[in-house]
Image (cartoon, rainbow, N blue to C red):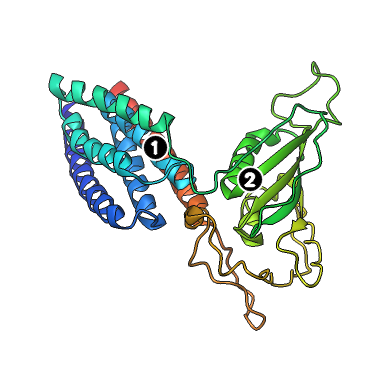
């Protein structure tokens, strides 16, 4: 282990800085529990700590960070509210994580970590619901759905048709992740289309012949719905349109344009807000689902060369890149030991 001592000292120094950052963000979150940026700061710190623990085989620290990451993810998705038990669990985790990066790990630190793991799992299993909990229903393929109830007042209803395409498509995209993101925007009803499903023995594991029809009630707006499919355009065909509008507008709105896998030349018109949406905030956790600082499109605005990406998706992308870096470093350490 002597060749790794220098790197281990650097990692411990970084972990100490991340724990300090985590504590300051938690204290700020106590006074502003709806601030998305604070939640994301804490999540990124915990994710980096977990990666460092896995890299140097601190199993207790990695396990605790993993459970804490799951807890934070519930808040990021709007499933759990920030409350006293959540803050106390996170602060206790911050205090326990540092001793777990020592060698050997003391018995007292191991017992404290195991006790906190039980607390985290208990809090995760009984999350406090947001103000307007999302509901989902996934009937068995081929079953008939009853007529959908009208969308609640202040929400828009989107009808989404979604189907993967190409061979080995499941290697590149996870349809469950897309459906979960839609659930994070509001209440969804999902119907699977198994019309192309025939011979199971001839079905390739990496292919997907299913399609989905989705009714989504949300106050997040069109841009947030389209952002869910921003990385799926190459591997999927989807169409998004308004199904039911509430409250009823003075004029009927045109259906949204179909977004095919290849870029289209025609530009969409800017979305007009329905009456009353700007004044109502039925879900105080709506700021956790969309980026409030994302600018709207103006008629006289010049076309942008870049692509707007939802903050939560960017965090997920950064997390995946971090996992790749950690895996590469682990392979390097193993190779050095074998040589």
Between 329 and 200, the one lying in front of the other is 200
The N terminus lies in quadrant: top left
Where is residue 17? Give x, y as percent: 20, 48
Do labels 2 and 1 touch, CB within 8 Å?
A: no
Location of residue 133 (image quadrant): top right
Give the residue at x 14% y 19%: 107
* Residue marked by disc 2: 187
Between 236 and 286, the one lying in front of the other is 286
Where is residue 254? Give x, y as percent: 81, 66
Give the residue at x 25% y 36%: 93
The C terminus lies in quadrant: top left
Between 125 and 192, the one lying in front of the other is 125
Location of residue 34 (image quadrant): bottom left
Tell me if mark 1 has few (under 14), some (14-19) or many (20+) residues whose alpha carbon lies within 10 angstroms of its own: many
* Residue marked by disc 1: 71
Q: Is residue 200 above or below residue 12?
A: above
Q: Secondary structure at mark 2?
A: strand
Where is residue 205? Give x, y as percent: 70, 24
Give the residue at x 59% y 72%: 296
In this view, which residue lies farthest toward the bottom?
300
Give the residue at x 32% y 27%: 63
Q: Earlier in the sequence, mark 2 or mark 1?
A: 1
């Amino acid at each position: 282990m002597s060749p790794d001592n220098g790197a281990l000292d650097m990692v411990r120094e970084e972990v100490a800085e991340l724990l300090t950052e985590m504590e300051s963000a938690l204290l700020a979150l106590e006074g502003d529990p709806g601030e998305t940026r604070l939640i994301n700061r804490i999540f990124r710190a915990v994710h980096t700590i977990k990666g460092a623990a896995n890299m140097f085989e601190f199993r207790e620290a990695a396990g605790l960070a993993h459970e804490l990451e799951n807890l934070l993810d519930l808040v990021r998705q709007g499933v759990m509210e920030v409350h006293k038990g959540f803050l106390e669990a996170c602060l206790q985790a911050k205090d326990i994580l540092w001793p777990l990066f020592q060698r050997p790990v003391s018995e007292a630190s191991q017992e404290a970590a195991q006790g906190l793991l039980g607390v985290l799992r208990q809090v995760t299993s009984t999350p406090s619901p947001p103000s307007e909990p999302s509901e989902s229903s996934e009937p068995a393929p081929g079953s008939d759905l009853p007529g959908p109830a009208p969308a609640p007042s202040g929400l828009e209803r989107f009808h989404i048709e979604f189907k993967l395409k190409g061979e080995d498509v499941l290697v590149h995209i996870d349809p469950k992740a897309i459906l979960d993101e839609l659930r994070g925007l509001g209440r969804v009803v999902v119907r699977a289309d198994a019309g192309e499903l025939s011979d199971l023995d001839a079905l390739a594991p990496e292919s997907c012949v299913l399609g989905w029809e989705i009714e989504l009630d949300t106050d997040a707006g069109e841009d947030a719905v389209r952002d869910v499919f921003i990385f799926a355009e190459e591997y999927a065909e989807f169409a998004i349109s308004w199904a039911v509008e509430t409250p009823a507008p003075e004029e009927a709105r045109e259906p949204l344009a179909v977004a095919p896998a290849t870029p289209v030349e025609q530009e969409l018109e800017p979305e007009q807000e329905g009456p009353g949406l700007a004044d109502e905030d039925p879900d105080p956790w709506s700021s956790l689902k969309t980026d409030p600082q994302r600018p709207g499109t103006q008629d006289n605005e010049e076309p942008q060369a870049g692509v707007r990406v939802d903050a939560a998706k960017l965090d997920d992308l950064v997390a995946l890149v971090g996992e790749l870096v950690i895996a590469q470093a682990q392979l390097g350490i193993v190779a050095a030991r074998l040589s």
